Image: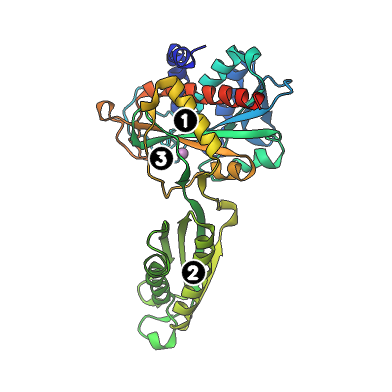
Amino acid sequence: MDLNQRARALGGQITAWRRHLHTHPELSFKEYETTAFLAAELAKMGIAVTTFQDYTGCIGIINPQHPGPTVALRADIDALPITEDTGAAFASQNPGVMHACGHDCHTAMLLGAAQLLQEQAQDLPGRVLLLFQAAEEGFCGSRYYLEKGYLEGVSAILGMHVCPDAPSGKLSIEEGNRMAGRDNWRITVEGVSAHGSTPHLGRDAIVAASSCILNLQTLASRVNDPLNPLALTVSTVKAGSQFNIITDTALLEGTLRTYDPALRATVKREMETVIAHSAAALGCTARLEFIEADAGDAVINDHPGLVALAQSSAAKLFGPDILCHVEPSMASEDFSCLMQAIPGLFVFLGIHDEGCGAVWPLHSEHFAVNESILPTGSALYAQFAVDYLNQQEGR
Ligand code: NI
């Protein structure tokens, strides 16, 4: 079967799914209606679905009894705390919540792939696991399915994300760095409070925090090799109560983004040193805490065989001109959690299209896509699964 042709024929249905999801977005870990909707749609297709008592998201399996290998396809299903301002007829009806990262597209594309694959289930030499994953924005929502053993036996996994940096409908299937690792952190600076008129009697936590902020900048400019990607951002500063009090506490929060594990370790260590000495020079202390539950590794396509296979799947469907280059991003993706356990591949699907106003970055309240890309994503998901299983069988 020509999966591109079949996906185009299914385009109206895939778009309807996407619009339904877009109208009814739900935040991370709260995707109850979304999960129920997905489970019902998969059941309608005759696909075995697993939902969870204590967690959102669901897993569909095509050919659950097949003894052959298992390939997984993953879509993230959660939305963001953003008030939509697109004017679309199918705009969000949940106030303050919006699918502004394209996860509605990913989910609809995977539903489309589910339909395409189920139609030819009897010809597949293995199983396809469809992972509709909760809480990507909450970071590491994917850990649950791994830790509970729901992904056991999966020997390869494909994830996809829409990409405003690439032309609409083009695919970036590339080896190497794709999305950065993330470490969110918090710094507590402590001094001694005093009246604002007597600075010599206090130890000003605000001045010490300011020194920490400025000296942290030198890690990117002086410690790091300029050719090695690094972003270290202080994003919040909280301190003080009123105009005539020298405060004894200041809180800083921020994020560290890296690809290189050695650099990641070095910067984490150097941050401790820099803030301890910056604060000590002003008679204060500073404590650094990394938020482990929120940390994630980089998304790096380090399985050349999977990259080559997906490239050939894409070329088979759309011709070789479908492929494009996208620079690595310093944003993060919890697909990395899955990639730590399962050989994985992460693909970008371009959405930039001035003709239909799809010019906004991810997480914008104006975020838009040209829905003609949806069958492209469905066809690639499905073709990759078919080609992977056939390749495994041929071994
Ligand atoms: Ni996203």
Q: Residue furthest bottom?
A: 200
Label 3 Cα crowd, 10 Å radius (few <14 / some 14-19 / many 20+): some
Q: How far apart are marks 1 and 2 (CA)?
A: 41 Å
Q: Disc count in the image?
A: 3
Residue at the spot 45% in from the left edge and 59% down from the top edge: 254
Q: Distance between the residues labelled 3 and 2?
A: 32 Å
Q: Position of residue 72 (x, y in %)?
A: 61, 30
Compared with 117, 347 (above or below) is below
Q: Can residue 301 be seen in this view?
A: yes
Give the residue type that dot 1 points to.
Gln
Label 1 Cα crowd, 10 Å radius (few <14 / some 14-19 / many 20+): many
Residue at the spot 41% in from the left edge and 47% down from the top edge: 329
Give the residue type that dot 2 points to.
Met
Q: In which quarter of the image is the C terminus?
A: top right
Q: Residue 271 carries which label?
A: 2
Q: Which of 371 and 309 is in front in this view?
A: 309
Q: Which mark is residue 311?
A: 1
Q: Where is residue 316 in the image (x, y as percent from the top left)?
A: 46, 21
Residue at the spot 58% in from the left edge and 42% down from the top edge: 339
Q: Residue furthest front?
A: 395
Which one is earlier in the sequence, the residue at label 3 or at label 1?
3
Give the residue type that dot 3 points to.
Ile
Q: Residue furthest left?
A: 355
Q: Residue 82 carries which label?
A: 3
